[in-house]
Every structure is written in C-alpha cells, then in structure tokens.
Image: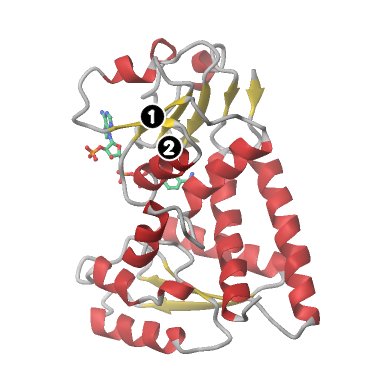
Amino acid sequence: MTIIDGKAVSAAVKEEIKSETAKLKEKGITVGLAVILVGDDPASKIYVANKKKACEDLGFVSEEYLLPENTKTSELLELINVLNNEKSINGILCQLPLPKQIDEQTVINAISPLKDVDAFHPSNVGKIMIDDYDFVPCTPAGIMEMLKYYNIEISGKNCVVIGRSNIVGKPMSMLLLHQNGTVTTCHSRTKDLSEYTRKADILVSAVGKANFVTADMVKDGAVVIDVGMNRENGKLCGDVVFDEVSKKASFITPVPGGVGPMTIAMLMKNTLTAAKKQNNI
Ligand code: NAP
C-alpha cells in the first residue's frame, strides 16, 4: 500500500509554477490574484490567509479585499466589475460561502470567465462538460494531478465518486470520464451504496462525514481518495476510516496531507494559466 503524499505532489506543482512565473517576470508580465472575503467566518479567514501565503511564495501579486458581513450583493458586484477590468489582476476568487443576504450564483456569474480561477462560472462549467477547458475546479484538478503523479491508470477502471456537489463530486466524475474511466456518481439517495463502492477500482469520497467509508465498502487493491474534511474531537479527519481501509487499498490519501494541499496548488496553477491566456502566451 502506498500513501499518496499530497504535500510532495503539491510542492512539485508549485515548483513548476514558480519557475514559469519567474520566466514571465523576465518578460515584464506579473501574475495577479484578487481574493475577496465577505464577513469573518474563521475557516474562510484561514483559507484566504493560506492563499495569500501561496501567492507570495510563488512570486504572484496578491490583493485581498475584506468586506464587512453586511455587504450588499450590489456592492460586491461593483468590486467584481472593477477587478474584471483591472489589467494587473488575472484571477478573481470570491471565498464561499457568502453571507445569506448575498446571492451566490449572481456573484459567480459576474466574475469574468477569463478570470474565474475557481472554475465555477457556468461558461467554465460547460467547457468542462465538453472537455475543452482552461480552468478546472481546484479540488478535482488536484486529485487528477495526484493520480497522474503516481501513474495510476484510469482508462477502463471502475471509478465511483461519492458526492455530487458542483465544486467536487460532479466535476470529479466528469474528469474521470474524460480519462475513459467508467464512472458512477453516488449521493444521499443512492440505495445500497456499498454495492457500488465495492466494485470501485478508484473510489473518491466527497461526503463530509467522518468514519463514513469503512473497510467492508472497499475492494481489495482499490485506490482510495479521501476528499472529506471533518472535525472529530477537534482533530481534522477525512471520510475514510484510514486505519482499516489502508490495509485493503493499493493507494490511499491521508487527511491531512492528501487532497487538501493540492487544492491551493491548483488554484495557483489556474491563476498562472489565466495570466498566460490574458497575455496571449
Ligand atoms: P457537499 O456540497 O455537502 O456535498 C456532499 C455530498 O455528499 C452530496 O452530494 C450528498 O448527497 C452526499 N452525501 C451526503 N450524505 C451521503 C450519504 N449518506 N451517502 C451518500 N452520499 C451522501 O460537500 P462538498 O462541498 O462536495 O465537500 C465534501 C467534503 O469535502 C467536505 O468534507 C468538504 O469539507 C471537503 N472538501 C475538501 C476540500 C479539500 O481541499 N480537501 C475541498 C472541498 C471540499 P446529496 O447531493 O444527495 O445531498
């Protein structure tokens, strides 16, 4: 059994981004990311701080916009409009979730698809569907990068994704399908979930429930990717019961240190792609 090392893979991805960013700088091109945070959700604050640090490490310009909890949709749209037209900003990320008075989809729709480094805009979502895209949502993109790094074959494999959210489950299923996996997407209404998971050569769990995937649900030799980020007794854990499932898996991601570190790396990769596209490179 091999533990997939998300920290090592993300470090390799970031190293590549750093060297490309330095080369762009020599041509007078900087890479800029604007991060918008509305309100003071503690988890969101940590994510935003981590993104800022990653930008600094890679030589990106990062701008942070911290807006109060009672911000109106119109005020946020005004800021997005300014950033859409700001040449030095290549990527715009609005940290979700937003306070309840703000309509999330309206905000997502307002970000220019060319600067939509989260790949949540309907135009980018549609492009993923037809396998002709520049940006992929960061978590599924990071998982694909890890599978590639470990030379894990997808073509012809039974791939089971538990979860169908717009940011993880659905794009994950689509990316595996594009690599010729035979994909089943399961969700809370799936009957006899383990009937499906036991057939999976590659099992991705994106549910958000601790101890959800147990050894009896997993086929011998399966590749198990744990997207879950849950807190149990104050400790971060995934969806998978690591100790027992790791005894059956051929490859498995730990939590922490698996999928998590990849997400930020792929956000940075999308931002670099945006900068290159906007400068016709
Ligand atoms: P989400 O929007 O809450 O989606 C959860 C999915 O799990 C839904 O599709 C839901 O089905 C399904 N589900 C819930 N209970 C189930 C059950 N008993 N059996 C089968 N399916 C069930 O969550 P998300 O945004 O996709 O995130 C999922 C997890 O990944 C969370 O723990 C989140 O924190 C974590 N996450 C981690 C990263 C990272 O970088 N590591 C990034 C993003 C998310 P229905 O659609 O039927 O409700």
Please tell me which residue is depicted at 39% across the width and 40% down the height of the picture: 173
Compared with residue 81, is residue 215 higher up or lower down, i.e. above or below? Answer: above
Residue 244, image x and y in percent?
Answer: 50, 13
* Disc ID at residue 228: 2
Residue 218, picture quadrant: top left
Amino acid type at image mark 2? Gly
- Is the residue under label 1 in contact with that under label 2 (CB below 8 Å)? yes
Amino acid type at image mark 1? Ala
In which quadrant of this rendering is ligand 1 seen?
top left
The front one of 76 and 222 is 222
Please tell me which residue is depicted at 54% across the width and 41% down the height of the picture: 143
The front one of 116 and 34 is 116
Kindly report which numbered mark, 2 or 1, lies closer to the viewer in this rendering: 2
Residue 271, image x and y in percent?
Answer: 57, 68
Residue 38, picture quadrant: bottom left
* Mark 1 sits near ligand 1, with its Cβ under 8 Å away: no
* Mark 2 sits near ligand 1, with its Cβ under 8 Å away: yes
Quarter of the image with the N terminus in it: top right
The front one of 46 and 59 is 59
In the picture, measured across the screen, residue 27 lies left or right of residue 111, that is right
Mark closest to the chain's N terminus, 2 or 1: 1
> Is disc 2 surrounded by few (<14), some (14 to 19) or many (20+) residues within 10 Å?
many
Instruction: Return the residue at label 1.
Output: 210
Compared with residue 43, is residue 151 higher up or lower down, i.e. above or below? Answer: above
